[in-house]
Image (cartoon, helix red, strand yellow):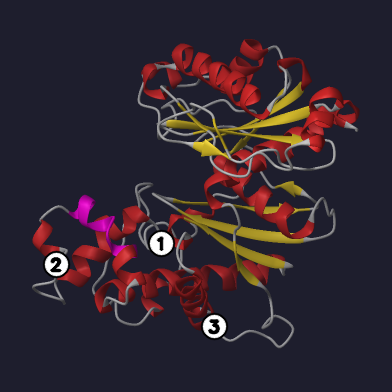
Amino acid sequence: MIGTGLGENRRIAVAEPGLWRRHFVDSVHVVAGVDLGGTAVNYTFLDGHRHFLIEELCEHPARSREGPGQCLQQIADGLELAATAVGISRSQIVAVGLGTPGPATAEGVFAAAGSTNFAHPDWAGYDIRGGLEAKLGLPVSYLNDGNAAALWGHFSLFGESTTATSISAVIGTGLGGGVIVGGEAIVGRNGFGGELGHMLLPYRSIPGIDGLVPRCNCGRTGDLESLCSLTAIERSLLPFFLTRHPGHQLGELGDMRRAAKFVRGLAEKGDPMCREIFRVQAMALGLFIDAMINVFDPDALLVGGGALETEPAFQDWFLGEVRAGMPPQRVEQADIPIVVMPNGDTDGARGAAIRALSVAGAELMP
């Protein structure tokens, strides 16, 4: 382990140090993966042998709320620091993959209202891919952060397979994810392909939630994100279940946003109400997965995000509840793998780096 000075109290692990690392420094080109969030930028590097050179979080403050100018400079500065930390020079980076929250086009142009996570007005309609490319003087590819995470999940299972299909759902503040077919993320005509969180569900079939009206930030009622996200816990599920569990310790906090952050930890410890909240989330995922199976007949489904960054026992329980929420499947579909996405904290940066491989082309060959 080596300290990087990136962000606050962050450390990274360099893959295969020692002799291999010295050989890498001397001779190999890399692509960088950059996952830009509202408060932090996460970095990784991928070499021509398809080895990731950073195993854990490698973060730098984003300053995205200060507008494009400050933020892009922060990305560039953090990239230099991350490269130095793993012992590579700037000249060895041949391409960069960028992932950000949306809404944005497939080319990385934010919507007229700007990105959901970036409050500064100058982000509205901003071409962040083109802006970063000009700043770095390197080819930059773009995916929204959900599609980037899905691409990493697919790569972790199937490598660079062009025949396998996978579906990923990433549970965070919202619900991201993506569909990978033929080794590529489906991005669609306007870049909104794979916006899985806004699929409407027959949520009234979930037992134990009679009277619940789950509303999403997008304006829909009963989509996946309205039931399966931290925001869903805060706005819908926790207030709903607290009325059925008077005197619960989370109700005594008097602040749903703060209380929502404790639900997963209590559920992991077996708290009955919090387990019920996560059961509802799992069953919503089961309904979603049923739809995905019938549309894509995928080779695997991945579930990731903060909700699954827990002990294996809780992960197993949660995935069991996901299967319990699925309507009966045909025999050919019943054994489809549902797995937890690995390296959840770094999935966006890793997926962005994988996307950058197609930009780097022959330059990345060892």
* Residue drawn at point x = 74 percent, y = 24 percent: 95
**Contact check, label 3 and label 2, Cβ < 8 Å:** no
Mark 2 or mark 1, which has the lower sequence index? 1
Q: Is residue 261 magenta?
A: yes
Q: Which amino acid does the dot numbered 1 rest on? A: Cys
Q: Which residues are magenta?
A: 256-264
Whole-percent x, y for residue 96 in the image: 69, 26
Q: Which mark is residue 249?
A: 2
Whole-percent x, y for residue 215 in the image: 31, 57
Q: CA distance from mark 3 to mark 2?
A: 34 Å
State the SS at label 3: loop
* Left or right: 102, with 294 as reference point: left
State the SS at label 2: loop
Count neighbours of disc 1 (C-alpha within 10 A) and say few if under 14, some if 14 to 19, many if 20 or more. Answer: many
The image quadrant of residue 93 is: top right
Main SS, magenta residues: helix
Mark 3 or mark 1, which has the lower sequence index? 1
Circle 3 sits on which residue? 327
* Residue drawn at point x = 42 percent, y = 23 percent: 64
Circle 1 sits on which residue? 228
State the SS at label 1: loop
Q: CA distance from mark 2 to mark 1?
A: 22 Å
Q: Nearer the viewer, mark 3 or mark 2?
A: 2
Vertical relation: 77 (above or below) 202:
above
The image quadrant of residue 144 is: top right
Mark 3 or mark 2, which has the lower sequence index? 2
Vertical relation: 52 (above or below) 311:
above
